[in-house]
Image (spheres, helix red, strand yellow):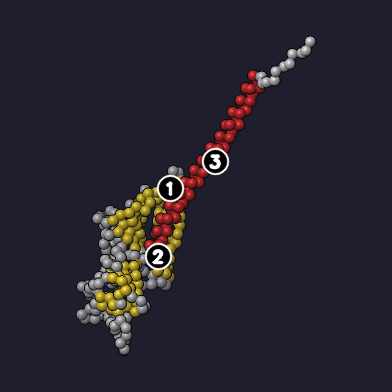
Amino acid sequence: MRPVARQAGFTLVELVLVIALLGVVGTLGAGFIAQAAQMYRVGTARAELMDEASEVMRRLAREVAGSLPNSVRVMLAADGAYLELVPSLAAGRYRAHASVSAEPGGNDPLEFGASPPDTSFQVLGPPVDIAPGSQLVVYNLGSAEADAYIGNNRRTPVATGAALGTVSYTASGGGFPIDSPDHRFFVVGEPVSFHCAGDGRLTRYTGYGWSAAQPTLASGSFAGASASRLATTASACSFELDAGLANLGSLLIRLTLSRDGESVTLLHQVTVDATP
């Protein structure tokens, strides 16, 4: 008589143990996966915030570096930090003295203190491009004697266009007050202001005109101006202007962007040309 063969299989206890072990392993694995996914989300959000902050900082630095010498001014007000500048569109040298011989392009020096006031000058070197709506500035010191914001060293060109070898301008306010030691002139656009409200809004304002006093929202200076939002996550920012030595200064820009519990702070020091 043959013995009865026993069937291979799992007992109920073994099955329960396997299920329990699989549950433990699955829970641990899910925890590791969830942690890795969270780290990826945080890293991605931080990288996006860094890219946004870097782009805003590059925009600010580029506009400051391309501004009219001695036109950068900052203000800390109750409603946030303000930065204002005058964009420089072109620059050149004017003829300071009459030539003893005829030269190509004419012989028209820029005269100071002439009566009636001088209204034109010859450009030395390459011709300049004068954009419509732009202004001419000579020797901007940023002081009462010669300040583009006040307007005593700023005049309106009569003709605009490309490659102008002789520049004519209106002299309703008299001639230019001070001769530039390097005989330089600048073609500038209207002032530009940046306002950091501290609640996430970093706004750029244009088209509000010229003012001796630095404009603010509280004073209504930006009524009718064009506004563009550079950032909506700027939780803090500051502008620190250092006049420096000789003809070089610096502007320290500190910008903090925050979103979804993550914050990125960037500091950038921009060299400011003070040679008028």
Front-most of residues 193 and 58? 58
Front-most of residues 215 and 26? 26
Q: CA distance from mark 1 to mark 3?
A: 23 Å
Q: Residue 93, located in which quarter of the rendered image?
A: bottom left
Q: Are marks 1 and 3 in contact (CB under 8 Å)?
A: no
Instruction: Using the image, tell me which numbered label, if any, was put on residue 36.
Output: 3
Q: CA distance from mark 3 to mark 2?
A: 42 Å
Q: Is residue 245 left or right of residue 116?
A: right
Disc nearer the start of the sequence (2/1): 2
Secondary structure found at label 3: helix
Q: Quickly name the residue at label 1.
A: 258
Front-most of residues 16 and 73? 16
Disc nearer the start of the sequence (1/3): 3
Residue 200 position in % (x across, y down): 37, 49
Estimate how packed mark 1 is, as few (under 14), some (14 to 19) or many (20 or more) residues with alpha carbons within 10 Å. some
Front-most of residues 254 and 127? 127
Estimate how packed mark 2 is, as few (under 14), some (14 to 19) or many (20 or more) residues with alpha carbons within 10 Å. some
Instruction: Using the image, tell me which numbered label, if any, was put on residue 65.
Output: 2
Residue 263 position in % (x across, y down): 45, 48
Taking the image as drawn, is residue 97 in sight?
Answer: no
The amino acid pointed to by label 1 is Ser
Q: Residue 18, located in which quarter of the rendered image?
A: top right
